[in-house]
Image (cartoon, grey):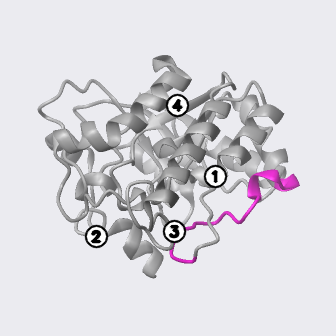
Amino acid sequence: PKAVVLFCVDGKYILRPYMPEDYEEDCKKHRVEGMVHLDAGWQGNPVDETKWVDGLPSKIMIRGIVGMVDMTKGPIVVDQVLQDHKQASERFVGVRFNLMWHKDKLVLKEKAKEGTSQSAPFRESFGLLSKYNLTFETYCYSTQVMEILDLALAFPEQKILVDHAASPIGVGGAYASLGKTSEEREKILQDWKDSMTKLSQCPKVYVKLSGLPMAITGFGFEEQTASVDDLVTKIGPLILHVIDAFGPQRCMFASNYAVEKVFVSL
């Protein structure tokens, strides 16, 4: 599909196995003491992915596993899946269900539809996470941040992690139908800043500082891998805004490898 190609750009890293030893090689210049595995689009029962990851040998200890759970299936189904994940690994610490949706057909979507997190089956399922002391993680776009805010206000004690700083689509340049003019890009940036500032008022919401060099933000790093100077000048202001709003204690690094390897090195 065109939306997948536009998002991923090049499949040379994601269309082959990317194992813990590959990550260890990629980050060998750094002192990495542990990592968390996030679901990787396992085909079939996502609990099998948790079992498989739990059995992997790794020099860099896999400290936690975040697995996929389809939160639209309703509380009876979801409760059983959560139990199965927990039984599959003691390191199972959270659930990811991506809410990414956009009206532009060239912007990547997954299972979620517009307003999925406001549906009764989703919210009834969401309410089960605290029962198992699990975090909720999602990737959404900047146009959906108010949806996350609504969810966070409805469940104020639930920890929510927002991946890739809620990608502001086209903030650095044209992507699909967005960000084609400097005026539009300025509005995308300001709307993203305003919504993230509002979201930061929810103390149980955390943000992953990742994904911003990807093609979807429009900075063009798919054409030439981002240098340190590129990251500082183009991505830096976005990262600093998130840190200023949420505080360093509610921000975390995520490599987003191997997806992001096309755009930036570790």
Residue 22 in the image: x percent, y percent?
19, 48
- Please give the label number shown on residue 90: 4
Q: Which residue lies furthest to the left in this view?
A: 29
Q: What element carries label 3?
A: loop
Residue 250 in the image: x percent, y percent?
52, 23
Cα–Cα gap, marks 2 and 1: 25 Å
Query: What's the residue at 51%, 73% (across, down)?
Result: 177
Is residue 114 shown above or below 85?
below
Q: Nearer the viewer, mark 1 or mark 4?
A: 1
Of marks 3 and 4, which one's residue comes earlier in the chain? Answer: 4
Q: Please name whichever residue, 229 or 124, is drawn nearer the observer in this view of the structure.
A: 229
Residues in magenta, as a range:
105-121
Q: Which of marks 4 and 2 is in front?
A: 2
Look at mark 1 in the image and give the residue it sits on. 69
Residue 49 in the image: x percent, y percent?
47, 53
Inspect the image, locate mark 3, and give the three-letter code of the amino acid beneath it.
Leu
Look at mark 3 in the image and give the residue it sits on. 108
Look at mark 2 in the image and give the residue it sits on. 11
Q: Nearer the viewer, mark 3 or mark 1?
A: 3
Of marks 3 and 1, which one's residue comes earlier in the chain? Answer: 1
Inspect the image, locate mark 4, and give the three-letter code of the amino acid beneath it.
Glu
Q: Which of marks 2 and 3 is in front?
A: 3
